[in-house]
Image (tube, rainbow, N blue to C red):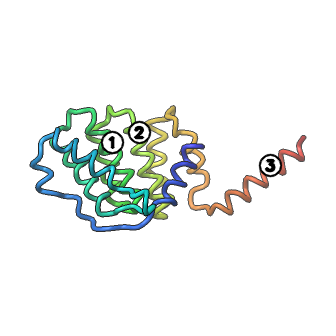
Amino acid sequence: MRLLLVLMLSTLFLAGCQTDSTKSPAAEKMDAATLSEKIGTSRSQIYNEKDNKFDREKAMEYIGYCQAYAKVAPQDPDAAKYLFQAAETARSIKKYDLAMNIYDQIYSDFSSYPKAPQAMFLKAFTLDSEMGKFDQARAIYQGFLEKHPTDEFADDTKFLLENLGKSDEEIIKQFEEQQAKMKEQQ
């Protein structure tokens, strides 16, 4: 449940959008070492602490480098890690379709990556909490539970399925009613 709260807060904290273009022909011609360096540099430029602002153009650049790295060095364990960070960055700047495409890529192309199940969960979570596409989210949440019933996100997934489409106020009211019933029974 803590993980769910962190995800929700990070999503609310980061906002905005920029161009959808993450494809950089120059990046795709770089070798893995150069791309790794570019990833580190661009990642450090995404957030300007002095101005307390995110540079969405740098975020998109970072995502492009991460995607290029996965193409250039798909066997490198860092490829999946970079893609996961790119998906989280895309989600943070409200590039939800891009984030979901990257989550799909992680889940299908990097299935042995320890966070591959989490990528599936985050796709459903994005559809649910950010895009309001509850039917699509439900199908993916259910698929997640079927394929990963013991995953650390399984309990969160069950909770989200039970409360799919409900507002925060409705969930709080339901929780308070349950608490009141429990007190009555004691």
Coordinates of residue 154 in the picture (x, y in percent): 53, 39
Coordinates of residue 134 in the picture (x, y in percent): 49, 60
Q: Pointer 1: what residue?
A: 107
Q: Which residue lies furthest to the left in this view?
A: 29
Residues at badges 1 and 2 in contact (C-beta under 8 Å)?
yes
Q: Pointer 2: what residue?
A: 117
For the point 49% across and 40% down, the residue is: 145
* Separation of marks 1 and 2 at Cα, in angstroms: 7 Å
Res 155 label: none
Image-quadrant location for residue 3: top right
- Amino acid type shown at disc 1: Tyr
Q: Please tell me whether residue 11 is drawn above or below residue 116 in the rendered image.
A: below
How packed mark 1 is, by other alpha carbons closer than 10 Å (few <14, some 14-19, many 20 or more), is many
Image-quadrant location for residue 92: bottom left
* Separation of marks 2 and 3 at Cα, in angstroms: 32 Å
Q: Quadrant of the N terminus?
A: top right
For the point 15% across and 52% down, the residue is: 27
Q: Pointer 3: what residue?
A: 179
Q: Earlier in the sequence, mark 1 or mark 2?
A: 1
- Amino acid type shown at disc 2: Pro
As drawn, is 45 to the left or to the right of 149? Answer: left
